[in-house]
Amino acid sequence: MRKVLYDRVIPVGTVLLAIIALWYAFAVILNAPFERDQAARANAEISTSQLIANTMRQERPVLPAPHQVAAEIRKTVFEISPTSKRSLVYHGWVTLSSTLLGFGLGTLLGILLAVAIVHSRTLDKSLMPWIITSQTVPILAIAPMIIVVLNAVNITGLLPKAMISTYLSFFPVAVGMVKGLRSPEIMHLDLMRTYNASKAQVFWKLRWPASMPYLFTSMKIAVAISLVGAIVGELPTGAVAGIGARLLAGSYYGQTVQIWAALIAAALMAAILVSLIGVIATFVNRRMGVRT
Amino acid sequence: MSVVTLRPKANSMPQAAKNVIDVKDLSLVFQTNDGAVNALSNIDLVVNAGEFVSFIGPSGCGKTTLLRVIADLEQPTSGSISVNGMTPSEARQKRAYGYVFQAAALYPWRTIGGNVSLPLEVMGIAREERKDRIARNLELVNLTGFEKKFPWQLSGGMQQRASIARALSFDPHLLLMDEPFGALDEIVRDHLNEELLKLWAKTQKTVVFVTHSIPEAVFLSTKIVVMSPRPGRIHEVIDCNLGSERTLDIRESPKFLEIAHRVREGLRHGHSYDEAHL
């Protein structure tokens, strides 16, 4: 317990407090001009303490204060029914489902590509440059096209959004797994050769287990960018549903509090997904006898 | 070259494979960026069933390369070689030998039992039989009770013993060992040498053993192959039979010292101690 307190709670808590303090400071600085304007128009004097208090309770602040965002999240998560279109849980679930589908497909695709590349020199030479090139295309440019093209062939809803997550997430997994599947030492490979092991046996008994640390590291990156992909995929559909829709609608109507609430929700979701993979990795590591 | 069959065994080998290893005029040239390197040059060698043969020589004399050619891990450029009367490739496919590397090369994600089980799984041996063999071979190398431990929980000497158990688990007649104790301290090495000798007496295997330690070679071997570098070649083959009941004490005996002296002379005449080669 003491160890957890000193290793985790105190360092993380300190940084969190610093961020919140900075956030409040900037909320005051950025929202103050509006309050001064208001006061000037009303020809009224405004005291500094009054000014600071006012900057934290504007309806459409430039930067909402943390407690305003917290209140918005509490309202839209706990007070509104999850089936309502005004519920953050509803929008969060829409984004999460396409994130997970895209991430699952991306991981699978990444692993399959890596397996193919490791086992074929030709594919290594021909496929790898394209895989790298694929990521130099700005996702913001390609996302609307994927949505539009798939809509034209009557594929709508979850899948097009998930495809964008897949497009982003297969990359770290493919690159990580190529490295991971090639990580066994020569001696470990020679050993398999002395047993006259088949390629499949070398894969399942040596390459695959050796690649596990690489897999989990790249999956952590993949799941985080899958979420980004899902949000980006929600923008061109015209703000129907999802965290992305929340962001877009918020910016249409100048609802900064709503935007920030959606942003924080997305960040929390990413953090939870990444740490879930961390938990799975720890479990697998323990089974594989990794020294802790 | 003298071929002395020290411990002939009846019926333990197919007739054709009385010479477990037969190398004739074998050469191996590596093509490197700095040009061709003559790793092995005109090697002739016969290893009989039940022998314990050591390859000794300085770095670069090709002793490990020769062992790897026998194991079909390197391909010779010219000459012929047979293992159990077959080509090395056929012998490897028939799982004719167990190979022990310089490092234990245990798979870190497998327990000690799991590592011993690895070749058995590859060879498709049933689970019950595997359990039996794991227990039997771990007992053979005095590692009973460590089956569930992971490699990092064992000392270097114990890890290397586990790797020997792994090589023995599928019961090959031929054991190829590439400086298996080179990375261990001398006390552990002495101890493992004694154990290996007992193991050899018990299992009646043919052993080919690469080393750069003269006492180790003399203590263990029935035949010492002295090799010299640039190009890698056999300088001399020295028969060495200190009797079957050897203990470490034998290393102070006149006979041991005389053979050790001959090996050292052989290495010197093969220019192993020349400045240019160090």
Image: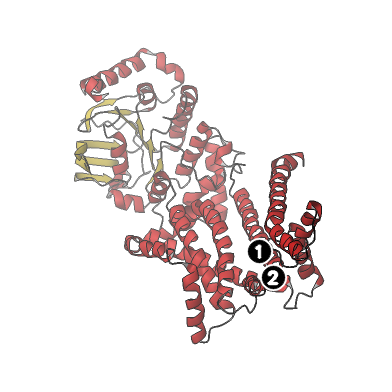
Query: Can you give x and y, in whole percent of width and height, for residue A72 in the image?
Result: 76, 66
The Cα atoms of the two marked residues, 1 and 2, are separated by 13 Å
**Same subunit: marks 1 and 2:** yes
Query: Can you give x and y, in whole percent of width and height, for residue B209 in the image?
Result: 36, 33
Q: Quadrant of residue B183?
A: top left
Q: Is residue B253 visible?
A: yes
Query: Can you give x and y, in whole percent of width and height, for residue A136 in the image?
Result: 42, 63
Tag of residue A96: none
B47 horizontally vs B108: left or right: left
Residue labelled with disc 2: A255
Residue labelled with disc 1: A263
Q: Which residue does the image show at 70% across and 56% down from the upper left? A: A27
Seen from the viewer's position, the closer of residues B55 and A206 is: A206
Q: SS of the residue at dot 1?
A: helix
| Amino acid type, label 2 | Gln
Q: SS of the residue at dot 2?
A: loop
Q: Which residue does the image show at 32% across and 36% down from the upper left? A: B64
Marked residue nearer the N-terminal end (1 or 2): 2
**Chain of the residue where label 1 is placed in the rendered structure:** A
Q: Quadrant of residue B270?
A: top left
Query: Can you give x and y, in whole percent of width and height, for residue B248 in the image?
Result: 45, 20
B194 horizontally vs A129: left or right: right
